[in-house]
Image: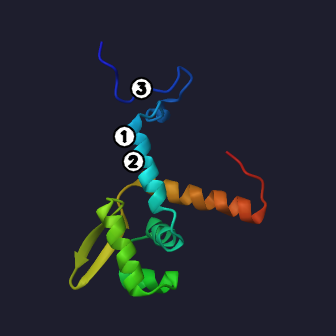
Amino acid sequence: MPARDHAPASPDAHPGDAHLREPDGARLTEATRVFALLSDTTRLHVLWLLALAEADAGTLADRCEASRTAVSQHLAKLRLAGLVETRREGRHIYYRLTDGHLRRLVMEALSHADHRVSGRAPHD
């Protein structure tokens, strides 16, 4: 019988946990690559803003208080990595996150940081 691609990690795993299994080298490498891209404060701020709504580079630069050139370079890196995608409307290019997993990862990372900085008790 062939191994299932999305087998639960344990018999006690919940059906929604279908992706939770022992990661192989390719998955660990990909997750490490994503975390590396999240390790820049401006890039993380951009991703947080995009988790809220799509936006153009100028709006993102204003909200991040960074130069448009710097934000554009971050967006190019994120697009090349497949974490953001674009939509053209006339002369404007709008950016958005590629999927909900990334949105939840960004929000959870910043929620965790909020608990650490504020001193509020962590929760599950």
Q: Is residue 82 left or right of residue 63?
A: left
Q: Which image quarter holds the C terminus? A: top right
Q: Earlier in the sequence, mark 3 or mark 2?
A: 3
Dot 3: within a 10 Å radius of its alpha carbon, few (fewer than 14), some, or many (20 or more) residues? Answer: some
| SS type, badge 2 | helix
**Amino acid type shown at disc 3:** Ala
Q: Earlier in the sequence, mark 1 or mark 3?
A: 3
| SS type, badge 1 | helix
| Chosen colour scheme | rainbow
Q: Position of residue 77 (x, y in %)?
A: 35, 68
Check whether the beta carbons of the residues at disc 1 and disc 2 lie within 8 A of each other.
yes
Q: Residue at x 48, y 55 (%)?
A: 35
Q: Which residue is mark 3?
A: 7
Say if 68 sits above or below 81 in the image: below
Q: Quadrant of residue 54?
A: bottom left
Q: Position of residue 99 (x, y in %)?
A: 38, 55
Q: Residue at x 29, y 64 (%)?
A: 80
Farthest residue, direction top: 1
Q: Nearer the viewer, residue 5 or 91?
A: 5
- Which mark is in front, 3 or 2? 2
Residue 118 in sight: yes
Q: Which image quarter holds the N terminus? A: top left
Q: Which residue is mark 1?
A: 26
Q: Which residue is mark 2?
A: 30
Number of marks drawn? 3
Say if 73 sits above or below 78 in the image: below
Q: Residue at x 44, y 87 (%)?
A: 67
